[in-house]
Image (cartoon, helix red, strand yellow):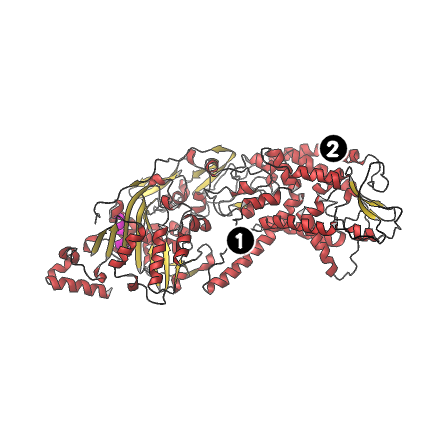
Amino acid sequence: MKKKSLLPSARVVVASVATGLVALAMLDITASLPSSVHDAATWIQFIPSLLSFLTAPALVATGFAVVLIVTLLFGRVYCSWICPLGYFQDVVIALRRFSRRKKSRFVYALPWSWVRHVGLGLVLTSAVAGLMIPLALLDPFSVFGRMMVHLAHPALAATNNLLSDALSASGFYWLKPRTVPGFDATSFAVGLIFTVSVVVMALRNGRLWCNTFCPVGTLLGLISRKSLWRITLDESLCTSCGLCAMSCKAQCIDAKARRVDFDRCVGCMNCLDSCSQGGVKFTLTTTTQPATTNSDSGKQPGRRAILRGLAVLPLAALVAKAKAATDVFSLRKALKPNQRDHFVSPPGSVSADRFNSVCTACHLCVSACPTRVLQPSFTEYGLRGFLQPYMDFHSNFCNYECTRCGEVCPTGAIMPLVAEAKKRVQTGVAVFVKENCVVYTDETACGACSEHCPTKAVHMVEYKPGLLIPEVTADICVGCGACEYACPTLPNRAIFVNGHAVHQVASEPLKADESKEEVPEEFPF
Amino acid sequence: MERRKFFKGLGASLLAGGFLSQMPVNEVLGAAIPLPPEAYDMIAVKGGEPDVMFDKAIAAMGGMKRFVKKGQTVVVKPNIGWDVSPQRAGNTNPGLVGRIVKHCLDAGAKEVLVFDNTCDNWVKCYETSGIEAAVKSAGGKVVPGNTESYYKPVQIPNGRSLKEAKVHELLLTADVFINVPVLKHHSSAQMSIAMKNLMGIVWDRRWWHRNNLQQCIADMVTWRKPDLNVIDAYRVMMKNGPRGVSEADVTVMKSLLISTDIVAADAAAAKLFGNEPADIEHIRIAHEMKLGTMDLKSLNIQRISV
């Protein structure tokens, strides 16, 4: 009597591809996947795409618009078909079947809509005010990214290295060891806390996360109130038996009232096959048929939700103040500390301020950076930039030729640069601290800084007969941090990069013509 | 060593008896009458492509079979320090490295392993230098040098400053060690040649920089001397070393030196570069520590033009 719907299976296929691509990009321990993979993975992801559109409109960032249109047509299908965090929860929910609780049924839950609406208001207003932390912490793509980059990626790299070690002990060197991204306690902790919360909520209450904390889910929920195709209960067939409600991981089907709170529906389509009468349908609806599909919140829900959001505006002002206050830092005790005006933001971020206002700390760049110089910040940018990546020259230094972070960044926080342009971006300038330098303290040769310098902004000049000491030509320095990384002094470095608040353009390093040929007539010995 | 001394002595005494033994033998004999290969301390070649020059040089030394026996494991250690193209001369010429690998395999080596502890990102260095491709196509194996787990602690009892270091495990097991540096200017050590190239077999280089770099460079030689040093002077970075800024730093010299004496090799290469060996501190120290000689006049050098 009723046909099985193809939609749930189709959803699994589409979602697996979408999340698979994101996971592939995030888990690339070789740091060498072509950036087209990253582009393909992130194009359709709502928050990155929206930010990319707002900050770098020149880019082809239309994925978010597609999501909006699809939502207007079919409701929040993004949440089940595209969102990687949604997919992760669905996997957890599927695993419930193997738990001791044999009956993995859901029950209808009250909407508590004001919670998520106020939350969305907070997130959006603070983002507009330039404080990205709430959005960064809650954006599902970024939450998933941090799970991958700080939990799964290191685990994969460590496994690879164990294997590689074992193989090389037997003389096989084809499996290359990979750098495990430096253990970052903060990111690990944040990743873990969010993973555990998401898992626990998924196990107990299905997609409660998406209908409580997720700003994307909440926003798309508001839009879905106008969508054309909707899940409906056919009153002529419905017996209020509750089978559909049991299958609903969004807990949004009220079987008794024969109503679907479509605001909270994540579009998984599982309910379509749950009804023995075939009474659950996904159909084109007209606005003249509101009773069965209306949201819980009565009349003019959209306007109310927006008002709730607006109530949060005064908070935004406070937030903006707080951001101004949290700026600089001085750190560490030492002989002569490296006092930076700013830590260094990635090339292509244009300025720390711009970067801090756009980045959602998804850490895709952290996983894609071949040298691992990009590390999540703790207080390096101040509280405002919590978890946003910065250039950590104690981990490594920025490869002169590399343009990868800008290529993979899905939000436009790090703009893509061609190699020639990137080599001229001055993210900061090296500062030489003579009192810390080996040449000064020990009067022995060193020059590790100058060795590593790609432009010879750091070069060696006569200090004493037969002894050279570093000197910095600031205008050709690009702030790559090679000098700081290579400097051997302890506990502080004798050379460090003082970051620019706003990136500058470096002068071209002295480049003459091509090499000349001079084969010796006779050997001089 | 003993055998070489023997031949030196033999050649000299054949000619004129005791007093002439102070003079380099082949200079007395002239190039027309070549000495047995073992008698040469160094072969210097110029005017050819890197692979051709190496063919000539190793033949003059008696062929690779003199250094590599059937079934042995060989480590070839080029300079792969930087993510720069071969034209920039920051790394050893890939064609030369490939050729050496091939000679080793032809001599019956069981395997030929190539690595460096790079300065720039190792994956990029191996690739951009062209060395990974050259080694693989010659039949050698490229071994990573980027993780500390490959490096094992060793004692350096004869070092003055450097008493211990962590050295790449390949050096602990390989039968033959061939050192293949590129000749270049160096902002810290004045010059980067054969001895300086050994810095790429250890893990913690910062320690060297903190503790009298030039002395540490010489100290490392006391641990394990390469069986053969092949100095690539095809393209030579004359300034802005060791990384270089552009091709303008490079002079094409089309030269190659090979020697079993690492100090002599460095001394001759320094001379070729235009420096006095004694002015390069680690060469002078190594000479004083009797790790080899920088007195080029005391050597038998065969000079070949291609």
- Magenta span main SS: helix
Left or right for A93, reference A427:
right
Q: Position of residue A42 (x, y in %)?
A: 61, 43
Q: Is residue A265 visible?
A: yes
Q: Which residue matches tag 1? A: A180
**Range of magenta residues:** B262-270
Question: Relative to residue B130, is residue A219 depicted above or below?
Answer: above
Q: Label 2: chain?
A: A
Could you say whether the residue bearing mark 2 is in a helix, strand or loop?
helix
Q: Nearer the viewer, residue A88 or B292?
A: A88
Q: Is residue A132 visible?
A: no
Q: Nearer the viewer, residue A370 or B196?
A: A370
Q: Which residue matches tag 2? A: A310
Nearest to N terminus: mark 1 or mark 2: 1
Question: Relative to residue A256, is residue A58 depicted above or below?
Answer: above
- Asked if badges 1 and 2 are on one and the same chain, I answer yes
At 30% across and 64% down in the image, what residue appears?
Answer: B65
